């Protein structure tokens, strides 16, 4: 039981040393992540369409 209590004390102590982001920073980084995910989704979707079309052409030739 003593080890568990010491663990939580140590965890709390480490959390006091964390530098938390401001609300403005969180909003800005969240926006960047959302934009990046949308761009990557569009890119993957485009590549998928191109490769699907190419594979369809190749398989229909046989």
Image (cartoon, grey):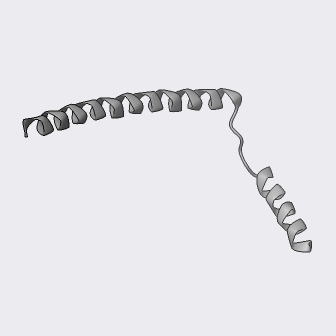
The x and y percentages for residue 16 are: 80, 51
Residue occupying image coordinates x 37% and y 28%: 42
The image shows residue 13, relative to residue 19, as above or below, that is below
Q: In the image, 44: left or right of 53?
A: right
Q: In the image, 36: left or right of 51?
A: right
Q: In the image, 10: left or right of 53?
A: right
Residue occupying image coordinates x 20% and y 31%: 53
The image shows residue 16, relative to residue 6, as above or below, that is above
Residue occupying image coordinates x 14% and y 39%: 59
Outermost residue to the bottom? 2
The x and y percentages for residue 52 are: 24, 34
* In front of the other: 25 or 56: 56
The N terminus - image quarter: bottom right
The x and y percentages for residue 8 are: 85, 61
Residue occupying image coordinates x 34% and y 31%: 45
Q: In the image, 14: left or right of 39?
A: right
């Amino acid at each position: 039981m003593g080890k568990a209590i010491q663990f939580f004390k140590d965890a709390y102590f480490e959390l006091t040393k964390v530098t938390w982001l401001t609300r403005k920073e969180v909003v800005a980084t969240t926006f960047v992540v959302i934009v990046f995910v949308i761009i990557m989704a569009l890119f993957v979707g485009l590549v998928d369409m191109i490769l699907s079309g190419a594979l369809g052409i190749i398989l229909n030739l046989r």
